[in-house]
Image (cartoon, rainbow, N blue to C red):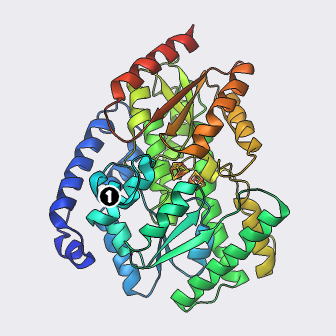
Amino acid sequence: MSENYTQMWTDLGLDLDKHDALLAVLGQAYQDVFLTQKNRPKSMEYFDFVMSEVHGLRIKEIVDARAEGRPVVGTFCTFVPEELVLAVNGVFVGLCSGADFGLESAEKLLPRNTCSLIKSAFGFAIEKVCPYIEASDLIVGENTCDGKKKSFEQYKDLVKDFYAMDLPQTRSVEGKALLKSEYMRFAKKLEEMSGKKITANNLKKAIAIVNKKRAAMHRLSKLRAATPAVISGLDSLLMNQVYFYDDPIRFTDSVNKICDELEERIKSDEAYMDEKAARIVVTGCPMAVPNWKLHSIIESCGAIVVGDESCVGDRGTQTLTKDNSNTLDGLFDYIVERYQTIDCAIYTPNPTREEHIKKMFANTKADGVIQYSLQFCSPYQMEAIPLENTLENKDIPTLRIDTDYSAEDAEQIRTRIEAFIERIQD
Ligand code: SF4
Ligand code: SF4
């Protein structure tokens, strides 16, 4: 980190010793997983810089934004519309929950059979090591899976200001009406916090910013389909993760710059991986920073991840929001329409997810699909077996991995992935 941010972290109320320990582990993991990769696109330097300043410069920007009266909103789920936060000139940050930290403290409040993501969210808040949590004026928790909605009843007491958002479980007419009324209630909350009205004009501008960000990710997804691959799955995952907390305009420019470079690579036949590397689509639970475990195992086995059907991936970015309405109500309808297309397993039934995976498998010229479920995540674990049966029936080789954030099962997963790669390359 280029500057000393100790005073800023103290002012935010972080536990400095524990925070130092976290940063040391994070920095080493980044070095081992990312910086040891060969032949990375040069423009990935931007993301290396972002990661080196993840608790520094970006937090300073957020603290400065707050000082200017801009509300900072922390979120856990892709159902929370960034467009509404940007419309009031707010700062939208995804809270990571991607590492085991404070597990013991979390398990004093939660049953042990809770998914790692929820435990991590608790651990980071209890141990006071996340400057994003501490810098948020409001933290939005959504009523999606049972684990999240029940755990938020306690989580609300760990943070400054907590806001519960109700979400539908079906894509019915009633579900759509609930989503719209919840988004309107959230808009009101944002207006109160910021003292700014959401108008058709500022909402349209916000939609345009988020659409451009998603369009850049679409461009990246298409380029990941190149054979041989021109970028690693790890670097692509990193971009999908940084998507949630970087400045949206700067992020879009940076992803487009990488895409320009990847297009050049394709033109000049400069591949990242060998043509014979097995190509994998990963699908399942979201992988928040710094959860790089599965991708790192897959790619160290010589395969490459060419697509991520995840909320930290194509599921979260796949659809743009229409903006060809001049009324606020019309724009709200478009936002609802867009967010209803998220193929999250909390929807029942959820047939579009399967269609999406098949499409990604074909478009990326993949050889196999790996389903990633966090242990104790009922929505994704419940979908996993029928999904595997359907995909295998369509001659799409599939492997199911149930895991958590610990490194204990890494060797066992590696053995299973090696066997899977052998199977799909036969
Ligand atoms: S998997 Fe579902 S509940 Fe989880 S972040 Fe994605 S949309 Fe939200
Ligand atoms: S990973 Fe599964 S159980 Fe955990 S918060 Fe997400 S949907 Fe809920």
For the C terminus, which image quadrant? top right
Q: Secondary structure at mark 1?
A: helix
Question: Along the line of sight, which residue is nearer the eye, 266 or 69?
Answer: 69
Residue located farthest toward the right when viewing the structure as drawn: 173
Could you tell me residue 15's position as x and y percent? Answer: 20, 67
**Above or below, comparing residue 17 to residue 24 in the picture:** below
Whether residue 322 is visible to the viewer of this picture, yes or no, is: no
The residue sitting at 36% across, 60% down in the picture is: 109
Could you tell me residue 106's position as x and y percent? Answer: 34, 57
Left or right: 283, with 105 as reference point: right
Residue located farthest toward the bottom when viewing the structure as drawn: 195
The residue sitting at 79% across, 79% down in the picture is: 329
Amino acid residing under circle 1 = Lys
Question: Along the line of sight, which residue is nearer the eye, 320 or 190?
Answer: 190
Left or right: 300, with 373 as reference point: left
**Above or below, comparing residue 70 to residue 165 in the picture:** below
The residue sitting at 43% across, 34% down in the picture is: 294
**Above or below, comparing residue 242 to residue 259 in the picture:** below
Q: Quadrant of residue 202?
A: bottom right
Residue located farthest toward the top when viewing the structure as drawn: 426
Left or right: 137, with 336 as reference point: left
Q: Count of labels shown?
A: 1
Could you tell me residue 81's position as x and y percent? Answer: 62, 67
Whether residue 126 is visible to the viewer of this picture, yes or no, is: yes
For the N terminus, which image quadrant? bottom left
Residue at label 1?
108
Specify whether tag 1 is near ligand 2 (CB below 8 Å): no
